[in-house]
Image (cartoon, rainbow, N blue to C red):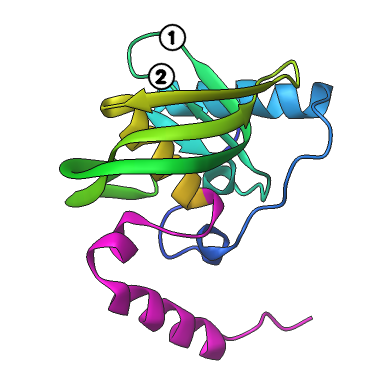
């Protein structure tokens, strides 16, 4: 089973690579991510949170599991504050300002491109998980100095000896 990476694991700060082909390996990864998300009682999960630098997110907001590959926000509207938590930041909840309506482009597990509008909780979860694909955490949305501190600390982090 995959394992959730916790802050300050450096992989959480890396940008993910686009998925070139939706194959069995990608489908298996998505299923494993859903399993980890459900076991940990989360609403969503992005691939870097399980140590994989691919642009894949999964979530379930009570309407069944959704899997999106290479998700991209095309348009944002209306900023609203909402309380967010994160499986990589256990016991942390922060009020984050996000768009209440978004238009997104995604690929599903069959590799089909979809473009749709969504709002409310689904829009918030999508934005949160897409942030993970870009190395952004909710901490950064609240306090940009945390990202600078992490970057500074990573410069001086000791490399393992061979």
Which residue ends up furthest to the top in the rendered image? Answer: 63
- Residue sitting at x 65%, y 83%: 159
- Residue sitting at x 55%, y 88%: 155
Identify the image quadrant of the N terminus: top right
Number of numbered markers:
2
In the figure, is residue 31 to the left or right of 122? right
Residue 143's image quarter? bottom left
**Prevailing secondary structure of the magenta residues:** helix
* Foreground pick, 61 / 32: 61
Residue 57's image quarter? top right
Identify the image quadrant of the C terminus: bottom right
* Foreground pick, 9 / 26: 26
Cβ atoms under marks 1 and 2 closer than 8 Å: yes
Residue 160 on the magenta span: yes
Q: Residues within 10 Å of mark 2 (few under 14, many from 20)?
A: some
* Foreground pick, 102 / 53: 102
What residue did someone put label 2 on?
60
Residue 132 visible, this angle: yes
Q: Does 36 sit above or below residue 55?
A: above
- Residue sitting at x 82%, y 21%: 24
Marking on residue 64 = 1
Q: CA distance from mark 1 to mark 2?
A: 5 Å
- Residue sitting at x 62%, y 20%: 31
In the figure, is residue 22 to the left or right of 102? right
Which residues lie in the magenta part? Answer: 133-162
Residue 62 placed where, x, y %?
33, 12
Residue 28 placed where, x, y %?
72, 23
């Amino acid at each position: 089973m995959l394992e959730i990476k916790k802050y300050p694991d450096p992989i959480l700060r890396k940008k993910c690579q686009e998925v070139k082909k939706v194959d069995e390996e990608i489908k298996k990864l998505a299923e494993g991510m859903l399993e980890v998300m459900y076991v940990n009682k989360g609403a969503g999960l992005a691939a870097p949170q399980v140590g994989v630098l691919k642009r894949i997110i999964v979530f379930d907001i009570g309407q069944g599991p959704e899997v999106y590959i290479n998700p991209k926000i095309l348009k944002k509207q209306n900023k609203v504050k909402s309380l967010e938590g994160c499986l990589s930041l256990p016991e942390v909840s922060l009020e984050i300002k996000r768009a209440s309506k978004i238009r997104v482009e995604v690929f599903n597990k069959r590799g089909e491109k979809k473009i749709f509008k969504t709002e409310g909780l689904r829009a918030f979860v999508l934005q949160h998980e897409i942030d993970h694909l870009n190395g952004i955490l909710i901490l950064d949305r609240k306090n940009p100095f945390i990202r600078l501190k992490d970057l500074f600390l990573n410069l001086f982090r000791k490399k393992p000896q061979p």
